Image: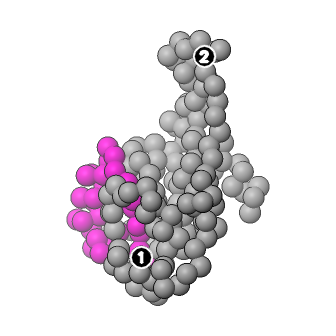
């Protein structure tokens, strides 16, 4: 857990560390059923109506596993060219992964949107067919996983594909 990490590695006093669980603003994150609005958002990010959208929203950092998502895209796209991989966010690995995608034959199927205003995130999640959180076990085992993105995905009523790591058991339990 993050609290244990702070206490053990940064020598914070236990009585000064409070754990606040993740939560989602349900006024912002909810299933959107307005087909015209969803079509408009798909057009904004250049996705056709018949394309299947797989989305990642978050920090493009080593522990987030976006590199695994890119590798998965390279394996899935030869079998289904109706897939679009939408990556929303920024971070340490963005430049490297963007180049990897651009240097591949699949560059038109992997869309990096960069940082977006927080108000847009619920709409982007709602145009997705599948939401992903391919966390890396090593770092998250040490610090604990903070799966806010998963709660936002779930609040929008979307299927979630995530790494099977400690702290994410609730995903399978809530199927």
User: How far is the residue under mark 1 from the one under mark 2?
Assistant: 44 Å
Assess disc 2: are there few (<14), some (14-19) or many (≥20) residues with their C-alpha within 10 Å of its C-alpha.
Answer: few
Q: Which residue is mark 2?
A: 16
Q: Quadrant of residue 142?
A: top right
Segment colored magenta: 83-110
The image quarter containing residue 78 is: bottom left
Q: Position of residue 149 (x, y in %)?
A: 54, 53
- Camera-side residue: 60 or 34? 34
Viewer-closest of 33 and 115: 33
Q: Residue 158, percent across and down?
A: 61, 68
Q: Position of residue 10 (x, y in %)?
A: 50, 16
Which residue does the image show at 54% across and 38% down from the upper left? 140
Q: Earlier in the sequence, mark 1 or mark 2?
A: 2
List the residue tagged with mark 1: 41
Q: Are marks 1 and 2 in contact (CB under 8 Å)?
A: no
Q: Quadrant of the N terminus?
A: top right
| Left or right of residue 131, residue 43 in this image | left
In this figure, which colouring scheme has been used for the structure?
A: one colour
Q: Is residue 10 above or below residue 112?
A: above
Residue at (29%, 64%) from the top-left corner? Answer: 101
Disc ID at residue 111: none
Please give the name of the residue rendered at 44% of the width and 52% of the height, measured from the top-left corner.
58
Please say whether residue 145 is visible from this viewpoint: yes
Comparing 162 with 46, the one in front is: 46
Position of residue 60 measured from the top left corner of the image (x, y, whole percent): 38, 49
Tell whether position 89 is magenta. Answer: yes
Residue found 56% across the figure and 48% down from its top: 148
Q: Please tell me whether residue 73 belongs to the stretch shown in magenta.
A: no
Q: Quadrant of the C terminus?
A: bottom right
Relative side of 51 to 108, left or right? right
């Amino acid at each position: 857990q993050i609290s244990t990490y702070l206490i053990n590695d940064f020598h914070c006093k236990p009585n000064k560390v409070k754990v606040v669980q993740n939560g989602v603003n349900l006024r912002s994150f909810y299933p959107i059923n307005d087909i015209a609005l969803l079509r408009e958002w798909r057009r904004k990010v250049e996705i056709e109506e018949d394309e299947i959208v797989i989305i990642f929203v978050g920090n493009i950092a080593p522990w987030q596993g976006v590199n695994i998502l890119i590798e998965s895209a390279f394996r899935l796209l030869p079998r289904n060219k109706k897939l679009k991989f939408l990556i929303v966010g920024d971070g340490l690995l963005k430049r490297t992964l963007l180049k990897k995608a651009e240097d591949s034959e699949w560059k038109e199927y992997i869309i990096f949107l960069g940082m977006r205003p927080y108000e847009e995130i619920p709409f982007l999640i709602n145009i997705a067919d599948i939401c992903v959180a391919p966390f890396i076990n090593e770092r998250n085992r040490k610090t604990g996983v903070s799966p806010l993105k998963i709660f936002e995905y779930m609040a929008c009523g979307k299927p979630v594909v995530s790494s099977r790591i400690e702290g994410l058991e609730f995903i399978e339990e809530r199927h």
